Amino acid sequence: MTTAEPASEPSRAGAFDLGKLLAERGAERYELHTRYLNHQLPRMLHTIGFDKVYERAEGAYFYDADGNDYLDMLAGFGVMGLGRHHPVVRKALHDVLDAELADLTRFDCQPLPGLLAEKLLAHSPHLDRVFFGNSGTEAVEGALKFARFVTGRPRVLYCAHAFHGLTTGSLSVNGESGFRDGFAPLLPDTAVPLGDLDALEREVRKGDVAALIVEPIQGKGVLAPPPGYLRAAQELLHRHKALLIADEVQTGLGRTGDFYGYQHEEGVEPDLVCVAKALSGGYVPVGATLGKDWIFKKVYSSMDRVLVHSASFGSNAQAMAAGLAVLSVLEDEQIVAGVRSTGELLRSRLAALTDKYEMLADVRGRGLMIGIEFGRPKSLKLRGRWAMLQAARKGLFAQMVVVPLLQKHRILTQVSGDHMEVIKLIPPLIIGEREVDRFVDAFTAVMDDAHDGGLVWDFGRTLVRQAVANR
């Protein structure tokens, strides 16, 4: 008598084939986005000629189907701190998937979150505990909640032109009206000018301020407070029993040439610190709110409050593995020291051009977070063209520089904010002298063209027509 063989198990992989799907439908990318997502994004990209098709990416470069390379000086708004597809981060993610961990059971304590918290806190010696969420705006939301709870006060101060996220709480401390318009009512928070200690003191004296949240360098415009401001603000806040929150979502993890941006000023020890973006390695979204022990113990004051602030996907194994790999690379490859030297090289070479170009008003920043600001020229011929752009919409000249950098020189940059004549450079932290040379050469060529009245101004007229049509 023969025994029947057991039926073979169905393939766990199923019929889904990602490579096949992309091969069949990848060319529809702009049409799909127009139909199902934010329809204004493809429209904007088509208008300014940014509707490229990038096939792959590695390090600080994108590549199109013809193999042309594009230098990335934007790093996904700072997410790609180590560039794209760093081999150490990739291996960590393969390893954590292959490990088949019992992740997100909700009722156990996995090792990876504790290990990542330990490693983060080693760079933050005055802080004691970490909450992991999924994004920068979540990290800010957590800090706002914690500050309000432990102080018992409702109001958080923020700086004009700040950007802390776009969810309702973080939007309440967003200093750009264009993001806030139409979403009221928001939380009862108050803006103060960046660097104005008198304005800060007037507000905290009212007795209802929980905290001040501040970016050590503002992403919008690449603006830093004056030396000594953060230390003086911290002392003023603590004197009035309020907290200092440092938003390091973009400036953190080496971007400014120190692990945190606030570390450039001696004696600054924020009560809460928000990080995200580069901690992800560019793969798995992660955000973290770091804080002092007494704050966490007051928020999580009993077993009844164990889940009073939580996140369904917070501390997931893939995000934790990516974060651990990122911190390991930062240490092993001495990334932060490289940021200091490369950033100084790039900033000094650009600053040397201010005497050559009358529309180049300022070069500022720290590390690899650099702002290039344009201003009104002196010569009569250029003043007329500048006035034409300004009358249509402030910020068009900066856009007029960004576009040829991509179209003619294959370098991706961004205008730093709406109605700003500032280009922000936040490239991957791994760039070196080769990338500095390429950017400075390309920028010089574009500025030569702009000051000679070349093809750049033809595109400027197109921007003017578009700006007028959108009014």
Image (cartoon, rainbow, N blue to C red):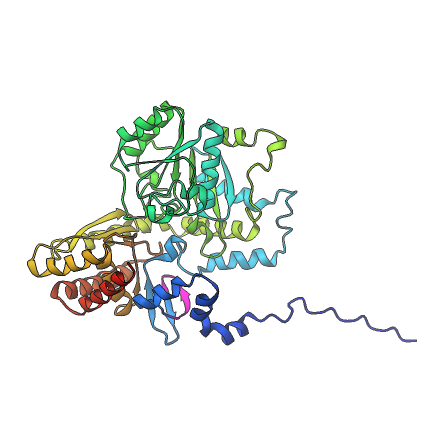
The magenta segment is 53-61
Instruction: Please give left or right for residue 114 compared with residue 60 in the image.
Output: right
Instruction: Please give left or right for residue 39 compared with residue 435 in the image.
Output: right
Quarter of the image that includes the C terminus: bottom left
Above or below, comparing residue 338 to residue 291 in the picture: below
Residue extending furthest toward the left: 380
Instruction: Please give left or right for residue 106 compared with residue 276 in the image.
Output: right
Is 244 magenta? The answer is no
Q: Residue at x 49, y 30 (%)?
A: 149
Above or below, comparing residue 146 to residue 420 in the picture: above
Residue 416, given in percent of the width and then of the height, sits at: 29, 53
Residue 408, given in percent of the width and then of the height, sits at: 25, 70
Q: Residue at x 15, y 64 (%)?
A: 448
Q: Does the image show residue 375?
A: yes
Q: Residue at x 27, y 42 (%)?
A: 224
Quarter of the image that includes the N terminus: bottom right
Residue 39, given in percent of the width and then of the height, sits at: 42, 63
The majority secondary structure of the magenta stretch comes to: strand
Residue 37, given in percent of the width and then of the height, sits at: 46, 62
Q: Does the image show residue 402?
A: no
Judging depth in this view, the residue of 176 and 87 nearest the camera is: 176
Number of numbered discs visible in the structure rendering: 0
Judging depth in this view, the residue of 233 and 187 nearest the camera is: 187
Residue extending furthest toward the right: 1
Judging depth in this view, the residue of 466 and 103 nearest the camera is: 466
